[in-house]
Image: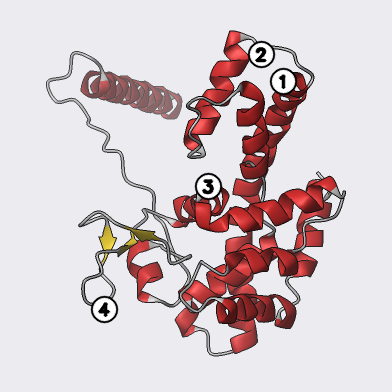
């Protein structure tokens, strides 16, 4: 009997202790607390692989391509969706039908983001020029350029500024000053917060800068001929990407061939269920 009473007393004591604990926690966490808990938002942790630490060249290349491919596919997917919406509006204006105010506003915002001067241009001219610009870059071409420009992910500009495509900027303090910059030159190598905006900036650069208009014409010709985008052909439009000119084009094409990168184009399209002709 005494044992039973002791058990009941112990249970009651435990219950009281739990109740007191709950009340204390509620007071500390509740709005009436004299000391509020502050949650500090931490920046995302971005880890860039140490490609220089991979001794096996073939393994390093494979891991470099695997790492970067997802970023390129993600941005290409975004561009492809924009292109699908743009195509609907281009069909409308090419049929001689006026866009609604909402459709036109959307197209003008897109034109601005793609560096298109719309002054004194008709909606048809704007839509057709945007069709040249709002389009994907084959994974194989982007990977080859990234490998070339970043020394396979080991260059100073990648490690310090996530600039994997060697993109320049021209305002003082906008990036990193090249150690071998020519006397009188003012350009800097642009700095990014992570790899994703670097990839986005690269694609936007190819799709907007006047130096790559020939590449966009080649791409549009393939589209009109219902051909799959061929990175080996598009590489001819990159002669102005580097001071090495035609030699640079050869370098990019060799990287594509030696690493069989066009297989990645087919694999990426197959996984995403994408018709490469569109």
Task: Depth check: give the residue in front, 53 or 119.
Answer: 119
> Residue 208, labelled with which disc?
3
Q: Which residue is located at x 22 percent, y 31 percent? A: 38
Callout 4 secondary element: loop
Q: CA distance from mark 2 to mark 1?
A: 7 Å
Q: CA distance from mark 1 to mark 4?
A: 50 Å
- Residue 205 x/y as whole percent: 50, 52
Q: CA distance from mark 1 to mark 3?
A: 22 Å
- In the picture of the structure, the residue carrying the numbered disc 4 is 179
Query: Label 4, label 2: how many angstroms apart (C-alpha)?
Result: 51 Å
- Provide residue 156's location: percent of width, then percent of height: 35, 75
Q: Which mark is residue 174?
A: none
Kindly indicate whether the residue at mark 3 contacts the one at mark 4 (C-beta within 8 angstroms). Answer: no
* Front-lying residue, 23 or 210: 210
Whether 276 is drawn above or below 126: the answer is below
Check if mark 2's residue and mark 1's residue have beta carbons within 8 Å.
yes
Where is residue 132 shown, x and y percent of the image?
A: 66, 43
| Contact, mark 1 vs mark 3 (Cβ under 8 Å) | no
Residue 274 seen in the current view? no
Crowd class of label 4 (few under 14; some 14 to 19; many from 20; radius 10 Å): few
Query: Which label was assigned to residue 93?
Result: 1
Q: Nearer the N terminus, badge 1 or badge 3?
A: 1
**How much space separates mark 3 and mark 2, taking CA atoms?**
24 Å
- Disc nearer the start of the sequence (2/1): 1
Name the disc covering residue 99, or none: 2
Quarter residue 268 falls in:
bottom right
């Amino acid at each position: 009997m005494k044992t039973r009473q002791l058990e009941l007393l112990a249970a009651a004591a435990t219950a009281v202790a739990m109740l007191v604990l709950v009340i204390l926690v509620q007071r500390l966490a509740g709005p009436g607390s004299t000391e509020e808990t502050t949650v500090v938002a931490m920046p995302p942790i971005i880890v860039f692989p140490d490609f220089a630490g991979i001794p096996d060249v073939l393994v390093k290349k494979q891991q470099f391509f695997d790492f970067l491919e997802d970023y390129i596919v993600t941005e290409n997917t975004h561009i492809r969706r924009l292109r699908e919406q743009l195509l609907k509006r281009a069909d409308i204006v090419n049929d001689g039908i006026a866009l609604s105010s909402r459709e036109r506003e959307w197209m003008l915002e897109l034109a601005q983001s793609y560096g298109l001067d719309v002054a004194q241009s008709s909606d048809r001219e704007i839509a057709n020029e945007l069709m040249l610009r709002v389009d994907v870059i084959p994974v194989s071409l982007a990977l080859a350029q990234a490998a070339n420009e970043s020394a396979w992910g080991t260059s100073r500009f990648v490690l310090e500024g996530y600039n994997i495509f060697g993109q320049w900027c021209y305002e003082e303090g906008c990036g990193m000053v090249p150690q071998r910059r020519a006397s009188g030159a003012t350009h800097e190598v642009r700095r990014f917060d992570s790899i994703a905006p670097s990839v986005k900036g690269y694609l936007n650069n190819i799709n907007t800068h006047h130096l790559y208009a020939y590449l966009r014409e080649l791409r549009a010709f393939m589209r009109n001929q219902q051909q799959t985008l061929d990175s080996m052909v598009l590489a001819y439009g990159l002669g102005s990407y580097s001071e090495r000119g035609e030699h640079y084009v050869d370098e990019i094409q060799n990287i594509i061939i030696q690493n069989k990168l066009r297989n990645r184009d087919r694999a990426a399209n197959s996984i995403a269920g994408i018709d490469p002709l569109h």
